[in-house]
Amino acid sequence: MSFPHETQVLVVGAGPVGLAAAITLTQLGINVTIVEASSATHKGARASVVHARTLEVLKTVNIAKPLIDKGTPVDHFTIRGSTEELLHVDFNLLKKDTQFPFALLISQELVEKIFVNELNNLGGKVHLNKKAINIQPINDSDKVEVFFEDGTRIITSYIIGADGIHSLVRKTAGISFNDPFTGKPYDDPNATDAFVVILSDLYLKEPYPEQISHKAFTVHADHFFFLLPLQSVDDKDGLFWRVGIGFPPNTELPKYPTQEDVQKLINERNPWPTPMVVSSIISASRYRVRAAQANTYYSKIGNTNVLLAGDAAHIHSPAGGQGMNLGICDAVAAAEAIHAHIHSSSPKEERDGIFAGYSTRRHIVGRRVIEMTKVLSLIANSGRLHGWKRLLRNAIFFVVNRVEFAKRAFVWRMSGLINRDQSSDIKQKKMWAKYYDDTVTIRLHKYPRGQMEPSFTHRGRMLNTFSFDN
């Protein structure tokens, strides 16, 4: 398929977000061209989980089942202190609420491979080595011309910017990109990272600690260390492990750690007596984690409508595995908004309200997810807490583990089901109404030798007590 001179919709960026948009648009009968700056699909330690709400959205475009067939559904995950369990997150609590009461462990690379195959089956194609370098309005028309580094160009009536953190589409549209809670721009040199993390995909020699599971992922908060099993893109290579190791902000680390670097870090963080020996690494990279969100997901370049999705619209901590999920849901919603805009018979100003609605709804969801990942980052980084702060962390986990509505609320948010559309939100509020007046009172009692003991009261009933050393 040769590169076209003109297209109805241009999708910039062919990660999972751009691919989901292109698949949806193609299924809706809209002429779409998708471009990718690099020469191949993305590799390396990136996203690794697809949640229930995302699977619900993907089911509407018939690409949920191919992912489930290749991924590993897990019904729980565990947050530990060192080796002791702090929180057991049970996705089975969602069985009455969704067809997908699990988290699907699957690498971003495999998601992209499946999405590319689906797009190809629909007659589409990803145009590689197409790095967009300039976007220019065409006179007073509703079209722009997009120029690429290789000298080619294309005319389009709509753009979906799925071109990542440093989005050319976002910058050309003049959309700011700041932390929604601190107001600091993402590229501010004085902005403080939430933390720094080494992510590595690797193979482990057997035997490895029996406490790590092939069917779940585990976070060790006291060691800022997590690992999860993933199926390789090439089935014959079997299972590999995604390992994450976190550090305080401004920690100096190599951008691309070697196998020896990763092994040394695992030795330092492994909480179990049995060693974890790395047989080989697929990739290892350092990431500096901070949050930002576009102030709007909709704007115009000239008279051309521009929508943002994925990392071009928001970036945040990887805690909770929310990024790819949020972006895919953006993408399908953006494609549906363009379809509605094209086929609307309303006056232009009213038609553009479709895009304003997309921006408002997805911005609310994005901010909610950023807020949640900031909290999860504090949990992941809580190993640096001492004294009453660690005690309070453990006390909160104690409550969540033992109060039904708290467990359900946590997993409802993690799964993304909280982000269903407004009609679903009404049902959701009715579903949770009986829990809204619940209050858990935590009291900390200090004893002479520094021992602290919290007590918990829920609906007037004492739950239990347990002790920690200060």
Image (cartoon, helix red, strand yellow):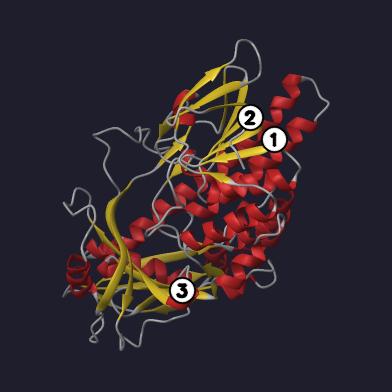
Residue wearing tag 2: 158
Mark 3: which amino acid?
Phe
Sequence-earlier tag: 3 or 1: 3
Query: Label 1 vs label 2: CA separation?
Result: 8 Å
Mark 1 nearby-residue class (10 Å; few <14, some 14–19, many ≥20): many
The numbered disc on residue 77 is 3
From what the image shows, is residue 407 above or below residue 272? above
The mark nearer the N terminus, 1 or 2, is 2
Residue highlighted by disc 1: 338
Q: Earlier in the sequence, mark 3 or mark 2?
A: 3
Q: How many badges with numbers are in the image?
A: 3
Q: Which quarter of the rendered picture does the C terminus lie within?
A: bottom left
Comparing 196 with 113, the one in front is: 113
The answer to whether any part of residue 19 appears in the image is yes
Residue under the image location 35 percent in, 32 percent down:
185
- Rendering quarter of residue 225: bottom left
Secondary structure under the numbered disc 1 in the rendered image: helix
Q: What amino acid does circle 2 point to?
A: Tyr
Q: Label 1 amino acid?
A: Ile
* Place of residue 236 in the rendered image (x, y in percent of width and height, measured from the top left): 46, 77
